[in-house]
Image: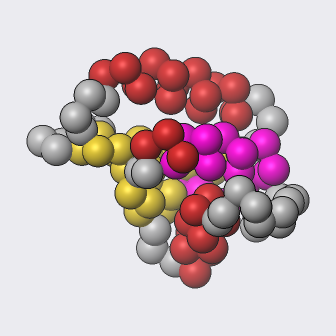
Amino acid sequence: MEEARRFVMRLEGRMVGAWIPECRQAWLALKPSLSSKKLALDLRGVTFIDEAGLLLMREIYDATRADLITHSPLTKHFAQQITASSSDNSKGALE
């Protein structure tokens, strides 16, 4: 979803397995068109993130400092894990 000053990438369901390369492909296709727009990752529909999904979300966040849109304790937890320092060695699936 594109807005005047930002682009919202809406994520839904489980960020696991075969969905990670699919999400990465979407991110790589989107990245060049961002230019001066701010990216927002809409996590409100996400129900689970495995380690590979977390790594991808951190990669996107590190590259863009995206706004993270949340609405529940679960999605706020995902946002905290995504923005956690690289030196934080907390690994594993997030549910």
Considering the whole magenta stretch, tell me its main secondary structure: helix
Evaluate whether residue 78 shows in this view.
Answer: no
Could you tell me which quadrant the C terminus lies in?
bottom right
What colour scheme does the image use? secondary structure
Relative to 73, residue 78 above or below: above
Q: Is residue 53 magenta?
A: yes
Q: Residue, x 79% and y 51% (percent of image)?
A: 50
Please provide percent x and percent y for residue 25.
58, 21
Q: Residue, x 76% and y 61% (percent of image)?
A: 87
Q: Residue, x 37% and y 20% (percent of image)?
A: 32
Q: In the image as oriented, which residue stretches furthest toward the bottom? A: 73
Evaluate whether residue 44 shows in this view.
Answer: yes
**Image quadrant in which you'd find residue 94:** bottom right
Q: Is residue 3 left or right of residue 74?
A: left
Q: Is residue 10 left or right of residue 38?
A: right
Q: Is residue 25 left or right of residue 87?
A: left
Could you tell me which quadrant the N terminus lies in?
top left
Q: Residue, x 16% and y 44% (percent of image)?
A: 5
The total of numbered circles placed on residues is 0
Please provide percent x and percent y for residue 35.
26, 28
Q: In the image as oriented, which residue stretches furthest toward the right? A: 92
Relative to 63, residue 77 above or below: below
Return the residue nearer the eye: 54 or 65: 65
Please provide percent x and percent y for residue 24.
61, 28
Q: Is residue 52 left or right of residue 61?
A: right
Specify start and end residues of the magenta stretch as a single range.
45-61
Please provide percent x and percent y for residue 81.
66, 65
